[in-house]
Image (cartoon, rainbow, N blue to C red):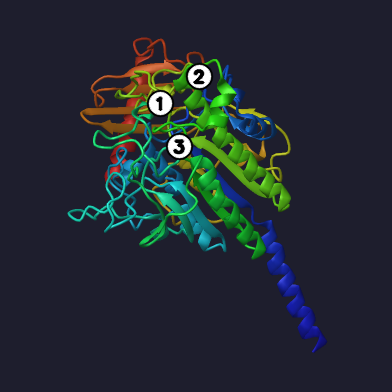
Amino acid sequence: MRSFWLLLLLICYSCSSSREQLPNIIMLMADDMGWGDAAYNGHPHMKTPQLDQMAAEGLVFQRFYAAAPVCSPTRGSVLTGRHPFRYGIYYANVGSLPKDEITLAEMLKGKGYVTGHFGKWHLGTLSRIVRDSNRGGRVQDTSHYSPPWQHGFHVCFSTEAKVPTWNPMITPDREAGGVGPGSAEGDFYGTYYWTGEGCLETRSLEGDDSRVIMDRVVPFIRNAVRHDRPFLAVVWFHTPHSPVVAGEEYLDKYTGLGDNYRHYYGTITAMDEQIGRLRKELEDLQIARNTMIWFTSDNGPAATGGGPGDFKGGRQQGETGGFRERKGSLYEGGIRVPGILVWPEKIAEHRETDFPAVTTDYFPTILDLLDISLENHPGLDGISLREVIESDSIHLRNRPIGFQSAYRNTFMTAWSDDRFKLVSKDDRESYELYDILVDPYEEKDISAEFPEVVRAMALELDAWLSSFDQ
């Protein structure tokens, strides 16, 4: 009998030890935040002490890319490891995440993780019956109903699309941007927070939207720790997407600057503050060492009132860090975004890498780190970054990153390897070539000097695009 209890105790200890070894995972994403919109990347005015601290402690990817130049496609790439053109999300508010796509949340549930999504979803509608946001609740078309609770998330506090960054349920003045022509200041904005099928949240939604989101993230994490469960928290802030509104305490941090700048900078500082709150909570719960925190943006800074790469002012005063063009463009300014990983258990001190990485890499990287086999998971566009995380001697990706985007009548493609980047703005009728290592701002087209490189990369790009039909 004694040997039976000893065996049972050993089994319990083994299970407990296994759970303790599983890292917690937090995936933070800003909305329309440019590569240059953080102090650690050289912004002259932005106050982002928490992001700066993460950069000072963790692994900074200097060449980190969004899989697409707009939000919905990039978000799908994060959860699936696949380019969104493989499953019909070509642009913002186009398509939805198919039910048969295997998500990171679904994979981690099978490993014992509790999973939560918080903030902007933008991968499908969240209601069939209540008129909500851009596409939700339209009786004539519910084909894009695809909420996070159908894709592996136990807990949700999610919106279909954008909300104001201050008082998210209330329509701000038109200077904030993102206000429809039929809307009046003070009215309900039109986008709900949903917590499940038919369940919308109506309480505690005042003030800074990043704080409203974090008010739900913190209890989720506490509950996971209380029940000794590893967790995946996908936290997709609305900041600094329009409508751009900052509270007075954040406006006051930027006195002396124009109102548009004060609001834009203020929203990012408010988000940064909530990231600090999150990190303090991890320390208080004594789980910070074995928690990986990823931070990025869904695309480059927005072009207020314009199309791809255009910039017409307004409150979305984002900085690309000098990279060419902006949101909607496959030049560097539209897709090169902040990239940070903090994980004290594996990353003991600050490191920077020029290894090209992209949001499709999240899925295979996390599964590889958890020793979950990808052998029976075909069609991935991302690769595992495990060796980059575990060693500072890995510099070459040795596998190009493909990009494509469809905006109205514009079809843009790009194929980027460790050195060169091939760009087409006319559906591969003609090409530009840039040496990203010596010309990161894409100022000199060198296609005429390297025709053999153009031919080889164009063939690779064609083969990659053809694989979408297989």
Position of residue 219 in the picture relative to residue 404 (left or right): right
Classify 10 Å Cα crowding around label 3: few (below 14), some (14-19), many (20 and above). many
User: Are dots 2 and 3 in contact, CB under 8 Å?
Assistant: no
In the image, 81 versus 203, the foreground residue is 203
Is 293 in front, or is 331? 293
Q: Is residue 442 above or below residue 382?
A: above
Label 2, residues with CA under 10 Å away: few <14, some 14-19, many ≥20: some
Kindly identify the amino acid type of the residue bearing the numbered disc 1: Gly
Task: Give x and y (percent) for residue 230.
Answer: 61, 58
Precedes in sequence: disc 1 or disc 3: 3
Q: Secondary structure at mark 1?
A: helix
User: Which SS class for mark 2?
Assistant: loop
| Mark-to-mark CA distance, 1 and 2 | 11 Å
Q: Residue at x 37, y 22 (%)?
A: 422
User: What mark, if any, has residue 266 been given in the picture?
Assistant: none
- Outermost residue, front direction? 186
Left/right of residue 13 with respect to residue 261 in the rendered view: right
Residue 457 screen position, x and y as percent: 37, 26
Amino acid type of the residue tagged 2 in the rendering: Gly
| Residue type, numbered disc 3 | Thr
Disc 3 secondary structure class: loop
Q: Residue at x 45, y 15 (%)?
A: 441
Mark found first going from the N terminus, 1 or 2: 2
Spatial CA distance of label 2 from label 3 is 23 Å
Q: Which residue is mark 2?
A: 321
Q: Is residue 107 above or below residue 349?
A: below
Check the picture and name the quadrant holding the N terminus.
bottom right
Mark 1, residue position: 334
User: Quick check: marks 1 and 2 in contact, CB under 8 Å?
Assistant: no
Mark on residue 165?
3
